[in-house]
């Protein structure tokens, strides 16, 4: 029925290619301050959310804030593509460091839909093949998530499933 049950304190990794709707969904499901977006941190450190050369500084800053939040016992969402195993390993390690549940929330939507959205976006000036490459990485990743340490995962496969998704929190 689309309900995702989360512990009051956990570390959620959004996983999905560019234009899969990670930021849009995260802001509907979670509270202000809970969602740490790599784009927002690129904007903060470099003045441009597409400044890929600022990714290291952006992620250092994002993880610094994530640690402060987890140390306070606050649920935290990492809004980045997270289609690469290295990116996810860092998230699982962070969850272990604070002994919180690592949760994967995957947006695996049809590639054609993502490419159509990408074409319509003035704010993502990179080539469409980047989206396709990220989709490929995502598809190869899906069956590995459990072994990587994600103890809970939800995979959304359609716009309808994304629209129906709700979060409940258990103490
Ligand atoms: P990026 O990784 O590039 O930041 P993203 O996965 O965070 O992308 P969003 O920024 O949330 O994706 O959305 C990308 C585009 O898709 C936006 O133009 C947004 O309006 C549109 N979009 C997002 N979710 C939906 C949806 N459920 N239905 C229709 N359009 C959507």
Image (cartoon, helix red, strand yellow):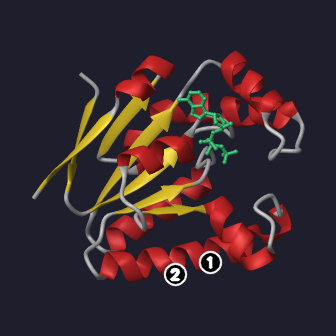
Q: Residue at x 40, y 64 (%)?
A: 34
Q: Which residue is mark 1?
A: 60
Say left or right for 131 vs 19: right
SS category of the residue bearing label 1: helix
Q: Is residue 69 above or below residue 93?
A: below
Tell me whether the residue at label 2 lies in contact with that at label 1, contact meaning CB atoms closer than 8 angstroms. yes
Image quarter where the C terminus lies is: bottom left
Q: Is residue 167 above or below residue 86?
A: above
SS category of the residue bearing label 2: helix
> Which quarter of the frame holds ligand 1?
top right
Residue 161 point in image, percent of width and height: 40, 22
Say left or right for 21 vs 45: left
The quarter of the displayed image where residue 7 is located: bottom left
Q: Residues within 10 Å of mark 1 (few under 14, many from 20)?
A: few
Q: Which residue is mark 2?
A: 64
Q: Residues within 10 Å of mark 2 (few under 14, many from 20)?
A: few
Q: Residue at x 76, y 24 (%)?
A: 115
The quarter of the displayed image where residue 110 is located: top right
Q: Residue at x 45, y 74 (%)?
A: 66
Q: Report, in whole angstroms, how far the alpha carbon at label 2 lies from the one at label 1.
A: 6 Å
Residue 88 point in image, percent of width and height: 52, 54
Residue at far left of view: 171
Residue 158 in sight in this render: no
Image quarter where the N terminus lies is: top left
Say left or right for 126 vs 27: right
């Amino acid at each position: 029925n689309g309900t995702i049950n989360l512990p009051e304190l956990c570390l959620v990794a959004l996983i999905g290619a560019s234009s899969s709707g990670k930021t849009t969904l995260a802001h509907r499901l979670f509270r202000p301050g809970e969602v740490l977006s790599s784009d927002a941190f690129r904007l903060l450190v470099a003045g441009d959310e597409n400044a890929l050369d600022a990714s290291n500084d952006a992620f250092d800053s994002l993880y610094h804030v994530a640690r402060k939040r987890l140390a306070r016992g606050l649920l935290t969402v990492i809004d980045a593509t997270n289609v690469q195993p290295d990116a996810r390993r860092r998230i699982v390690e962070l969850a272990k460091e604070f002994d919180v549940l690592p949760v994967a929330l995957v947006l695996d939507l049809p590639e054609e839909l993502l490419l159509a959205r990408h074409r319509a976006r003035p704010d993502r000036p990179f080539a469409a093949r980047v989206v396709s490459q990220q989709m490929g990485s995502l598809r190869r990743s899906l069956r590995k998530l459990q072994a990587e340490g994600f103890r809970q995962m939800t995979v959304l496969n359609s716009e309808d499933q994304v629209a129906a998704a709700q979060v409940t929190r258990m103490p």
